[in-house]
Amino acid sequence: MKLCTFTVPTSLGPQTRIGVAAAGGIVDATSAVIAHLERTYSPEGAARIGHARAPTDMIALIGIGGDTLDLVGESVEAVSASGQAQTAMGEMTFYQVGDVELRAPILTPPGISCFITWPAHIEDSREKGFAMLNFPEIGGDLRAYYKGHTGSIGHPGQTIPMPPYAKDMDIECEMAAVIGVGGKDLSREQAEQAIVGYTIFNDVSYREIQAREMAFGLGPTKGKDADFSNVMGPWLVTADEVGDPQKLRMSFDVNGEEKSSYNTSGMVWGFDDLASYLSRGQTLRPGHVITSGNYPGGSALDLGIKLGSGDKVTLKIEKLGEQSNTIG
């Protein structure tokens, strides 16, 4: 399934819901489950059970585990086939994409772990002002990542404002895995099962600030944590629909022109390995985001170009869709 978080206008202000791409639009996951349950329960009973089984918050939904997503999928199929427009109590089941605002699928992740998995990207960065960077030993027991700011979530389609302290905004094309039920000290097999799905991740960076900060040996801070600097979505595609996450084409477009492409097969470590490593002594909770790092050529820095105000950058990953943002 292709899951999303979206908002719809109401008399009380925007309301956040969980949707599934279906029938040429978006089916409301909670309303679809309620409509499906109305075949067995009273409208009031179906509403109570539906909201419990399919919450309107993505982290709550994917954290339930069990057959919850199967129930959502069955309900969406049933509603799509019947054309049922609303539940018995008047909750909308279907929206046109143009009638809603797509948000990041995970609005408040418990953690964002940004790994480096592409040696060529690090080598290229070292030649362009980041001589302090090193890649972990391939075959060794260490991986390298920094902790992204969980309060700086950006959304697809958004114009990303330039913070007052920076002048050089860059966009990084990354893929991210999202944890479902989670766990601690996971084997690679267990870690693979813990990943509920994948999304496009834009690791917005402010290069001149990042280069100065990383000379201290700690990692990027203001160079990557301004508001809206972790853009996700619009889709969280479930792992069963993605299949092998290490065989997907990625690309980086500027103003409609493809500037580069690569394949996730070039990652030195797969997402199962990264999630297993991250879970050492640490409980991974539902909604934790694990990113691949920037592929070689997947940023303006790698390409040797500068992005300016008004430039529209589109990141594409096979099976995950595309994400566009404009430089503010």
Image: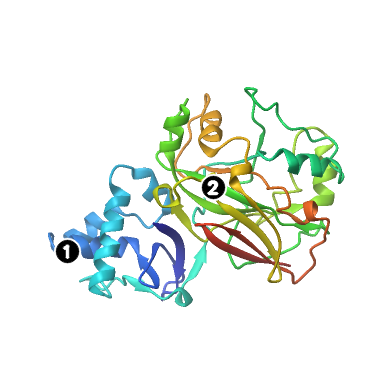
Classify mark 2: residues with Cα within 10 Å, few (<14), some (14-19) or many (20+): some
- Of the residues under marks 1 and 2, which one precedes in the sequence? 1
* As drawn, 166 above or below 190: below
Location of residue 216 (image quadrant): top right
The N terminus, quarter of image: bottom left
Q: Could you tell me how far apart the alpha carbons at marks 1 and 2 are, in whole angstroms?
A: 41 Å
Residue at x-position 28% and y-position 46%: 67
- Seen from the viewer's position, the closer of residues 165 and 274 is 274
* As drawn, 119 above or below 15: above
Q: Is residue 157 visible?
A: yes
Residue 174 locus on image (x, y percent): 63, 50
Residue 326 locus on image (x, y percent): 69, 68
- Amino acid marked by disc 2: Lys
- Amino acid marked by disc 1: Glu
Location of residue 164 (image quadrant): bottom right
Location of residue 261 (image quadrant): bottom right
Classify mark 1: residues with Cα within 10 Å, few (<14), some (14-19) or many (20+): some
Q: Which residue is identified by label 2?
A: 247
Q: Which residue is identified by label 1?
A: 38
